[in-house]
Image (tube, coloured by chain):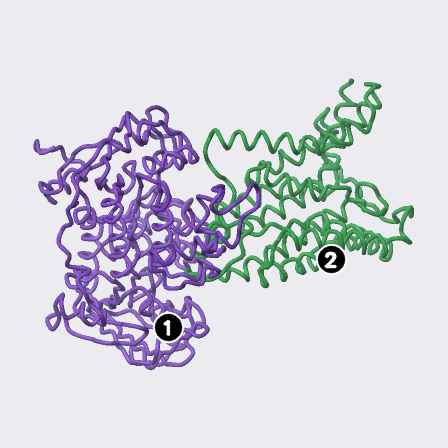
Amino acid sequence: MDYQFLALTIATAIGISTAILVAATGELLVEKVGVYNIALEGVMLVGALTGFIAGQTTGSWVLGLIAGGVAGCAFAMVFGLITVVLRTDMIVVGVALILVALGTTQTIGSSYVAVEAVTKIPNADIPVLSSLPFIGTALFQQTWVTYIAMALPFVVAFILFRTRHGLNMRAIGENPNAADTAGLSIVGWRLFYVAVGGVLAGVGGAYITLGIVDSWAGNVTAGQGWIAFAIVFFAGWQPLWILVGAYFFGALSVLGDVGQVMGWGVPSEAFTVLPYVGTVAVMMLRAWKQKSKGAVSWPAALGLPFYRG
Amino acid sequence: MTVVTDGAGVSLELNGIVKRFGDLTAVSSFDISFAPGQVHALLGENGAGKSTLMNVAAGFLTPDVGEIAVGGQQVRFGSPKDAIDAGIGMVHQHFSLVEQFTVAQNLAIGARDIGRLTSTKELNTRALEIGERYGLKVSPSKVVGSLSVGEKQRVEILRTLSRGARVLILDEPTAVLTPEESEQLCVNLRSMAGAGATIIFISHKLNEVLSVADHVSVMRGGALVDSLERRECNLQSLAKSMFDDFGTADERPRTQSATSIGEEVLVVRGIQARDERGAVALKGLSLSVHAHEIVGLVGVAGNGQQELEQIVAGIRKPDSGTVSIHGTQVGNVQDALKAGLGYIPEDRRGTGLVPAQPIWLNSILRIYKDNLVSKGLIIKTGKAKKYARDLAESVNLSTNDVTTLVQHLSGGNAQKLLAGRELSGDKSAVVAVNPTQGLDVKAAAAVRERLIQAREDGFAVLLISADLDEVVLLSDRIVVLYEGSVVGEFAAEDADLDEIGRLMGGETSNGNS
């Protein structure tokens, strides 16, 4: 494998991880305030279709991404209202919403299947850096969205661990009663972050149709929402590990293509399954590690509806 | 809504508050007021309506009828935040603290007087200042999860005060504390009242109320039955107000077994064990309990009681050492049960009973495989319910409808059911942990009576309790636990409370053991 090929492979892995990275970072925020939006896959799908349609209609990928974010936000709010306000079971509602999203987007999107995107998110080479040997090709010839996605976990880490806002967020996820008696509105904060998570998942979805596959097909997300959901666990709710997790899974999915090019003689289906097997393996490793450390790292109130008192 | 400006005390008046839950009227219309600079005790049995009334005052519940006035101004609370903005804060038995946060971080939740960007140094300095301002010592950088219950309570009180509470309501604050911690708390409350704060102290412990309060109000069945200055009341008068059918429950002299002690039943040998964090919790502990004997194990919480309890019950594995009952070594729950061990855990509604299930299912939880109530995989519902009815009757449960869900039973009735279950059948030993914690005097007496009965029946009873008075009252032998070892052992008649207290605190014995 020559250097240029390796650099391109890394670039591809980073590029196609963008959607997962953005969605997982959003989900981390949601989980930090004690809610898990298990409907992530559905939110991404809604964002993917809305973003694609907006792109086709307006001819602008920026408007496409924005539309994806708005649609994702709206769809996530349905989940938020049902689970946070009405305090129903997050798993049941989440899975139901995924099925709703799958069916609805397939129906609405049927006329867009196999239509090529009129607008694509362009690569933006960073001056100077992009002409560095190897690193330039691997890292600095991406889209703006990819660069922002890379920075996102750092921003989130700063907010969570260095600001008053983040302290309050974590308090809500760890012990909403403590936050409630301190005058914070649990329902308000949780809804807000379900919305933020929805925006990010929607943008992530739109990035798939406008930046990666450049077209729409039914179930175009193909489990990326689930992987993003799993990465939050894999990352142990640490923002910077989200970055590691997303790129790790991006690398796994690129391996299939690399294998074919290099003639490794492994069926490509074996590689398609890798990210999912990888998810399970990593989760098990994490569980073992936690068992030996005896520490629980998830927000203590994760998944528990809030009742006062 | 009034926001009270800084200054000393502020009065709280509750006028004609009514609060109903379904058919039950928890608080029924009366007027009560709390003056600044005083510790005002609200005394009553469990279910008398004390906590409900105070939850209304602190904004956790909205009253059906009635008015609240703070410093003479009418107020209306929609949430605890409204109440605290008006200067009223409540500290519950279950603290609202983030275990994973440091003390300083806990004090900073929701705070407005810190920068948008937080620095550990800033938060720690602020926590120290808060502690100094209210005269309570805390360690800002310690993680709350690692603190003792008493320390956590101090943080919770500081959190409430630092948010501007000038009326501080404490719901049975000493129920979770060791005797030393309780004493310290009372000293702190007295000095806060001295500085002008309004302290409301909910309790069902007469002695404690008499020692700390300036003013005592007694509630019974949702009504106010008495409101007196401290000098106007004594133990007898308060007890009479508290219980309409006051008997001898509280003043019973030490009990002594009628039968002499029998052979060794429950034997613990050289138990070494670690706690969840991997620290050594038990250091080769040995003890034995005989038939017709109650052994009381005392110690400050966190000195290995929990580990010992769980190892004896078979739900935790020791690193080394053995537990045997009648010579049969036991290593898991099934073994322990078969060998005849009953287990009354502290967490009666979580570990002992299944709250969302009816009485009859809870009654047969430990014997569901017995031919008495099942055949193969099938539970004989009729027989099981009959069994449960007999059990309910034998322990004087408030209801004989065994389809009632356990979560609808009062704490006392739940405990009676649990104790009855664990002491029935073919058993010869029992471990009881804080069996009367949180129960009112009557229910506590019934549970103690049951344990005494078990001793008469030949049981070996291991009583692990934080209530020193209870241990002295019931035990034939008292064993003191400190840092995972037995540091003292007393026959009941030689028990010297001061000596036991010193040993619990880690001082070495004066040769009495």
Q: Colour of chain B?
A: purple
What quarter of the picture does the N terminus of chain B occupy?
bottom left
Q: Is residue A304 left or right of residue B24?
A: right
Q: Position of residue B208 (x, y in %)?
A: 18, 59
B211 up-or-down from A3: above or below: below
Depth check, front residue: B409 or A182:
B409
Q: How many marks?
A: 2
A269 up-or-down from B103: above or below: above
Q: Amino acid at mark 2?
A: Ala
Q: Is residue A235 left or right of residue B483?
A: right
Q: Colour of chain A?
A: green
What's the distance in space between the residues labelled 1 and 2, CA to CA? 48 Å
Residue under the point 63% across and 54% down? A196
Is residue B121 visible in the rendered structure shown here? no
Q: Position of residue B122 (x, y in %)?
A: 37, 48
Depth check, front residue: B138 or B480:
B480
Residue under the point 46% across and 54% down? B360
Circle 2 residues within 10 Å: few <14, some 14–19, many ≥20: many
Depth check, front residue: B237 or B447:
B447
Q: Identify the element where label 2 is drawn.
A: helix
Q: Amino acid at mark 1?
A: Ala
Q: Which residue is mark 1?
A: B26
Q: Which residue is mark 2?
A: A71
Displayed quadrant of residue A97: bottom right
